[in-house]
Image (tube, helix red, strand yellow):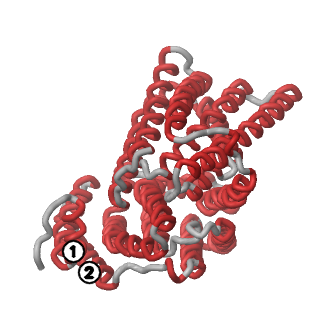
Amino acid sequence: MAERARVGVATHYIRYALGNVMVMVAGFVSFPIMTRLLDTGQYGIFGYYDAWLLILAGLFKLGAQHTILRFYPHSAGAPALARFGANFILLPFCASAALWLLAITVYAVIVRIAAPEAATIGWIMLLLLLPTIWISLAGAFAYAEERSDLSVRFAVGQRWAETLGILVVVYFIERSTLGAYLARLVVAGAFAVGLAFWLRTQLPLHFRDVDRGAYRDGVRYGLPLVANEISTNLLSFADRLMLRQMLGDFAAVGTYTIGYGLALNINNLFNFALYNAYTQVSIREFETAGVEAVLRMKRDVLHMLVYVTVGMTVGLISVGPDVLLLMAGDDKHASTPVFVTIGVIYTLDGLLGICSAGLLLLKRSKTVLLLTLGAAAVNIALNLVWIPRYGVMGAVYATAAGFLALNVARYVTCPRSLRALPDLQATLIAVACGALAYAIADYTQFAGVHSHLGRFAVMLAIMLVAYALPAFVLDRRLRNAACAYFGLRAAPG
């Protein structure tokens, strides 16, 4: 394959962030229509089998998507690519297919003994499972190759095709979960076939290149990350289960879920896109240029990221409540502190995660798993103490403590040669400008504007004048980096 021009973390981040926005827009398009076409019971069936689809897909991949990213041969030639394709894509998919056949057998026994509700949907879910796994592996390969342009097109294309397919089938043919799942199956099957042809043009996939030792190395690396995903979900979602059990009130769970759910959008737009952009470039730099190259890149990213993090934090504190009330309605005031606090936690987690990134470069996936399990344990233990005392906010405080413990542990266990902190001068400028912007907003009461959308617009203007412009004037490195990215000549100073 011809050598392609590489792009930087910023370009990857913008692509992933825009892709996430397009995926979210598809959800906004389908939600009001689907809620009118399907009743609550059908939505319950949809959610139930979707949860099983996510769980089984995660388990049956055996961490192969992580292995593809970390074991991709950045500096090797055609023979290494052939071995990579056989050992980390072809063989893992065959293992997933074997587990899939086992699941079908087990489900057939379950249906024969005592058929569950909507058993037909269960069969379609199982059929959907295999193309879902293949799409994930093909997407992981594009990700490993730093083809963020293709990764985003795959994700957005599939999401919009599913959305349109489901709406057409449910509206014109079958107004039930069965219609929605049939549409998803057709779209997933078509994407899986198309990606199979594409992947076959990118690298060989031959059993003759299989090396079982290399495959076992990949499984040893990937399996802890499967458990890590489960632990991460526990860190993020155990609060809801504990709120229900300890307070005995679904209203408390709803208050927490509304605020947390909107904060997750920040995680998707900011952290998820940032993680994808940084990880793929850092692995390539580590494999081809070594630790020093990774550290230089990390410091460049952190220099820009500290401004983004402080700016987002100030915005959340100032107009976060307005954003939630604008999205969820004025009767959701109880959820505003949940949204603001969790939003700030996720924002800071993105910055601190880059500071301590490095364990996966050294393939220490078991250490990553242990750290996440420890943070989840902290979260659960503090929930037991703080939920009875503080109610919903007790769960919020426990989540904050869990993420803090996780980031401290990440930094301590990260090798010294890969640790980095944001530049002190940039941090001081960001904090000072952020404090100025917050003070102006608070003193002027957003220029007397009371509407949620109006306050948000005023805050954007304040952030531009009191935060962004002073930062560019005071920080020459920030100014030069922005000019270089947009192809402009840096101003002297």
Residue 24 shows in the view: no
Is 203 or 241 nearer to us in this picture? 203
Residue on which the image places disc 1: 471
Element class at badge 2: helix
Question: Farthest residue in the left direction?
Answer: 492
Evaluate whether residue 479 shows in this view: yes
Residue 289 image position (x, y, % from top left): 45, 69
In the image, which disc is placed on residue 31?
Answer: none
Q: In which quarter of the image is the N terminus?
A: top left
Amino acid on which the number 1 mark rests in the picture? Ala
Q: How crowded is mark 1: few (under 14 residues within 10 Å), some or many (20 or more)?
A: many
Question: In what element is the residue under mark 1?
Answer: helix
Q: Could you tell me residue 407's position as x and y percent? A: 54, 74
In the picture, measured across the screen, residue 260 lies left or right of residue 82, that is left
Q: Which amino acid does label 2 sit on?
A: Ile
Decide if residue 166 is on the left or right side of residue 149: right
Of residue 242 and residue 25, the one placed in the foreground of this image is 25
